[in-house]
Amino acid sequence: MMSTVRLAFSPAPVHVRTARLVGVAVARRAGVAEELLDEVRLAIGEACTRAVELHRQYGLSDLVQMEMSDDHSYTVRVIDRAPIEAGLGLTALPPDALANEWLTDEALTVGVGFALLAGFVDDLQVRPVEVGIGTEVRMVWPVGK
């Protein structure tokens, strides 16, 4: 039977540590291999820090949401409520570059946080939550059940 743990916290850096601790505890219980737990801790910390920073940058008091489930794999979803362009790292580009189809090098350097996450997580997805608002960072690790 799949179990799900949900955590919502105010966008303050001090709460990221708590989210990491909860995430690793749930990962351990779900059966994630011991050698992957550091990656889980680092990835959750990076995803939550990113969400907190976006909320603070845009003056949002909405809670950052984190959802963990263990159905055939350990899946963590971190959801922010910032404008989608900011959540996807597009606001760092000048407006004329957003219309340019040659977004290779510049676009790749925008999401340093995404590059770090990709180094910690083999199965990583970043996608909009709803039209215009919020992004979801979805990370998946194998479990040994």
Image: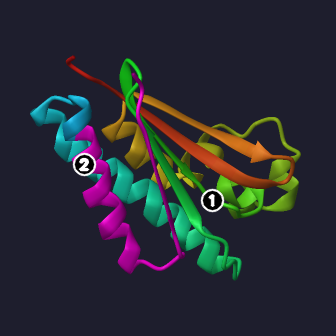
Q: Residue at x 64, y 78 (%)?
A: 57
Q: Residue at x 67, y 72 (%)?
A: 62
Question: Of the residues shown, which amino acid type is indicated by label 1?
Answer: Asp
Q: Is residue 45 left or right of residue 57?
A: left
Q: Nearer the viewer, mark 2 or mark 1?
A: 2
Q: Is residue 84 above or below residue 107?
A: below
Q: Secondary structure at mark 1?
A: loop
Magenta stretch in the rendered image: 1-27
Residue 91, how many percent across, how many down?
A: 74, 62
Residue corresponding to mark 2: 24
- Which residue is outermost to the front? 1
Q: How crowded is the residue under tag 2: few (<14 C-alpha within 10 Å), some, or many (20+)?
A: many
Q: Residue at x 71, y 64 (%)?
A: 82
Residue 27, how many percent across, how many down?
A: 26, 39
Question: Of the residues shown, which amino acid type is indicated by label 2?
Answer: Val
Total numbered circles: 2
